Image (cartoon, rainbow, N blue to C red):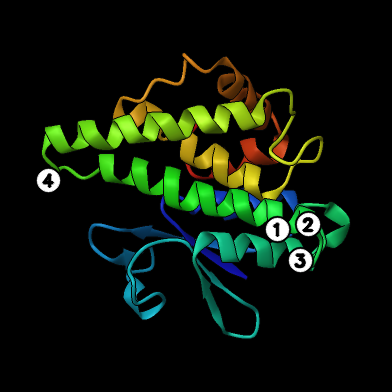
Amino acid sequence: MKLYYSPGACSLSPHIVLNEGGFTYDTERVDLASGKTETGASYRAVNPNGYVPALLLDDGQVLTEGPAIIQYLADRIPEKRLAPPAGTIERYRLMEWLNFISTELHKGFGALFNPQAPEDWKDIVKAQLIRRIEHASQRLAGKKYVMGDDFTVADAYLFTVLGWGKYVGVDLAPWPTLTAYLGRVAARPEVQAALKAEGLV
């Protein structure tokens, strides 16, 4: 398999999951501004949408969209418990989290990276985002990870997205539950390996 990624982007989430799952894989960095991969190829030939991540499978198929990729990976290695079994209520709770992270947190943070967005509009987005962060903090209260004691793919995604706060002026200090959570996830050796591979530490 090969993961197409851009350092610190949402592709960090499947990068972490690939490590946590013990997969053998390659990576290819993508320059999102130029649309080229590190080998000089057109990234749109891989993913017509032009954004990361994309996972090239061993049979030549390409899987896109982070939440789909990380669930695919988790289901290949059920013994690692990176996702609850399909069909269980716990799996739907995981999907509930993934959808919340994707639509309410990822999109909110993503909008704040847009240099063309007016500041007054960013203030509106940030106010909404802060309410969603508060909700995440409440749901994590008393838990080690999103689903309880087990690290899952949802933690890889939540860790990635909340980590963007420092780049867009969203300080997570008012939510000690979240800062402690981020510290726990960051301390995992496979997470550290992904961060180092992307030049983020």
Mark 2, residues whose alpha carbon is within 10 Å: few (<14), some, or many (≥20)? few
Tell which of 95 and 52 is nearer to you. 95
Q: Upstream in the sequence, badge 2 or badge 3? A: 3
Where residue 37 appears, as percent x and y from the top left, is 36, 65
Q: Which residue bears the numbered disc 2?
A: 89
Label 3: how many Cα within 10 Å (few below 14, some 14–19, many 20+): some
Disc with the residue nearer the chain's start (1 vs 4): 1
Q: Which residue is mark 4?
A: 116
Q: Earlier in the sequence, mark 1 or mark 3?
A: 3
Comparing labels 2 and 3, the label whose residue is closer to the camera: 2
Residue that label 1 marks? 92
The image quarter in which residue 141 lies: top right
What residue is disc 3 on?
Answer: 75
Mark whose residue sits in front, 1 or 3: 1
Q: CA distance from mark 3 to mark 4?
A: 39 Å
Which circle, 2 or 4, is nearer the viewer? Answer: 2
Instruction: Residue type at mark 3: give it.
Output: Asp
Residue that appears at 35% across and 71% down: 43
Give the residue at x 67% y 68%. 72
Q: Are marks 2 and 1 in contact (CB under 8 Å)?
A: yes
Image position of 50 (left or right of 193):
left
Residue at screen point 44% across, 42% down: 105
Q: From this viewpoint, is residue 134 visible?
A: yes
List x then y, in percent, for residue 169.
30, 25
